[in-house]
Image: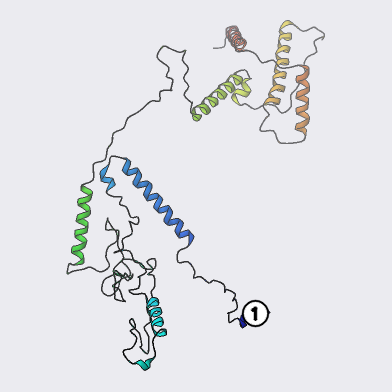
Amino acid sequence: RCKYITLLQNQEPAKKRSKLVLPSPQISDQELQQVVKLGRASYAAREAVSEGADSAADTLLNDYALATPNAANVARTPAPATDRILQEAQNMMALSHVDTPLKGGLNTPLYNPDFNFHPQNDQITTPNTVLTTPFSNRGPDGTGRTPGFLTPKDTRTGGATPTPIRDKLNINPEDIMGGDTPISTYQSQVKEQLRSGLRGLPQPKNDYEIVVPENEMVVQEGDQSTPNQSVEDQSDVDARQLAELAALREKELRSRSQVIQRGLPRPGDVNIILRPPNSDPPLTDLQKAEELIKQEMITMLHYDAVQNGDPYMPNRKSNINLHAQHLAYLEERPYENPSEDELEKAKKMLKNEMEVVKQGMNHG
């Protein structure tokens, strides 16, 4: 019903707006982020150089950022020379308020009427400076293809001005060499300019100074009360620990039997049969001493079998029973490790006994 009322009132019905279709972006977000990162990196490098006193390095970092926009250099959307809409509105008003042609006289003056059969269609577009490169994309006349426009006047077309180039170090050479200078001569001139610039660089400095932190405590000569708080290197700590372990093993090995020290073979089964202490006739003192030595030797054999197993013994189930027998024997007769003083004393006594035997039996 509202639709018909609107049509009766000579009003156009409301139209639904169509979906806005935009062209795909010419620069992606990732490319914009890369441009921002490069700009920040160059700015940080320029700030670091400007803080120092080296003016030679400052000349190598020029500002490639966009300068202040200049109306003569920056390409912009050209403004029309005249307001065509205003002119047409004035012409329509003049034609609507004209008197009857029966009066005669001159026609109604109009402003710049366009009565051509094919009217001119001037499309004003904004130039895209992203899709063109100042050097690699050039027109036939040697100028850039990025359109530039002059100051709006009565003319409807503008001139072509190249995109401004902010190349202060001449790192973007021209594709088209101007003039009659040969390319080889130009290259030699560029190399000579580079050599002269390198010769003008300052000499490298090799000045350094060793500064000791104030809070570091140094032990003076003859003063052992002040501790040295320097951190010891881990390799030195590991080497010291290995040396301590080696010294401890060597000390333990000196208290063991000569069989273990020299790596001599040992019997697989220990013979524990000894002479009975109460025998007839009774044992002499020499025989009793010999039995004590044998008993100590058997205890050492059991201890060596438990602490250092024979590597030449095959792995059998019977070895478990032998190990249990060794442990049972050591529980009844534990082995006592002799001290170094006792070992030295025993060696001296054994040496003296050997000398007595040699003299008594005339052994050379």
Give the amino acid at mark 1: Lys
Q: Closer to the camera, 189 or 298?
A: 189
Q: Is residue 241 left or right of residue 202?
A: right
Quadrant (top left/top right/bottom left/bottom right) for the N terminus: bottom right
Q: Closer to the camera, 11 or 157?
A: 11
Q: Closer to the camera, 260 or 154?
A: 154
Q: Closer to the camera, 18 or 284?
A: 18
Question: Quadrant of residue 186 in the image?
Answer: bottom left
Instruction: Pinpoint residue 292: horizontal percent, then vertical percent.
Output: 72, 12
Quadrant (top left/top right/bottom left/bottom right) for the C terminus: top right
Instruction: Pinpoint residue 228: horizontal percent, then vertical percent.
Output: 46, 19
> Residue at coordinates 59% horizontally, 24% vertically from top-left?
262
Q: Is residue 346 left or right of residue 36?
A: right
> Residue at coordinates 40% horizontally, 77% vertically from top-left?
85
Residue highlighted by disc 1: 3
- Give the mark count: 1
> Residue at coordinates 19% horizontally, 60% vertically from top-left?
188
Question: Quadrant of residue 162 in the image?
Answer: bottom left
